[in-house]
Image (cartoon, rainbow, N blue to C red):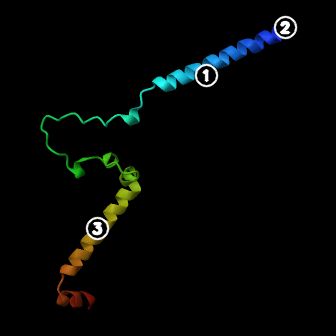
Amino acid sequence: MPEANVLYAVTAVVVLGLVAWVLVVLKTAKEPWARAVPQAAARSDDAPLEKEALPPSSSGEADATSEATAVVVAKKEADEADAEAKAEDDEKTDDEKEDAKA
């Protein structure tokens, strides 16, 4: 079967060509991790951004996007309402608290 030997030779040439191509591509690849981080474009007003003005996903934290979910927002609102109620209760005088109990 001489045609089988030809197929082996052609396959070997193709595989060697692919290996050589991969090596050349890897050797000439630019390494983005070796470059310095590009500076942000200057804004016209050059005012620093406030952390509250940024959306939750831009803070750089891994779980920052979870702060904007409906469940978390509702929980924060409930916690704020509880804190306000506690603050109002703390502001009452002792006499008012006794009158409320009676």
Whichever of callouts 3 and 2 sits on the residue coming sooner in the sequence is: 2
In the image, what residue type sits under mark 2?
Pro
Residue 74 percent coordinates (x, y) = 36, 59
Local crowd size for mark 1, using a 10 Å CA cut-off: few (<14), some (14–19), many (≥20)? few
Mark 3 or mark 1: whose residue is earlier in sequence: 1
Looking at the picture, which amino acid does disc 3 mark? Ala
Nearer to us of marks 3 and 1 is: 1
| Distance Cα–Cα, label 3 vs label 2 | 86 Å
Give the quarter of the figure containing the C terminus: bottom left
Is 52 placed left or right of 79 in the picture?
A: left
Image spot of residue 62 (x, y percent):
40, 51
Q: Which residue is mark 2?
A: 2
> Identity of the amino acid at label 1?
Val
User: In the image shown, does 78 or 30 lie closer to the viewer?
Assistant: 30
Q: Which residue is mark 3?
A: 81
Q: Look at the picture and state if 60 lies above or below 93.
A: above
Residue that extends furthest to the left in the rendered view of this protein: 45
- Mark 3–mark 1 distance (CA, rounded to whole Å): 65 Å
| Of labels 3 and 2, the one closer to you | 2
Which residue occupies the foreground of this view, 25 or 49? 25
For mark 1, what is the residue?
19
Q: Nearer the viewer, residue 94 or 23?
A: 23
**Mark toward the start of the polypeptide (1 vs 2):** 2
In this view, 2 is above or below 40: above
Estimate the x, y position of residue 42 in percent, counting from the top left: 18, 34
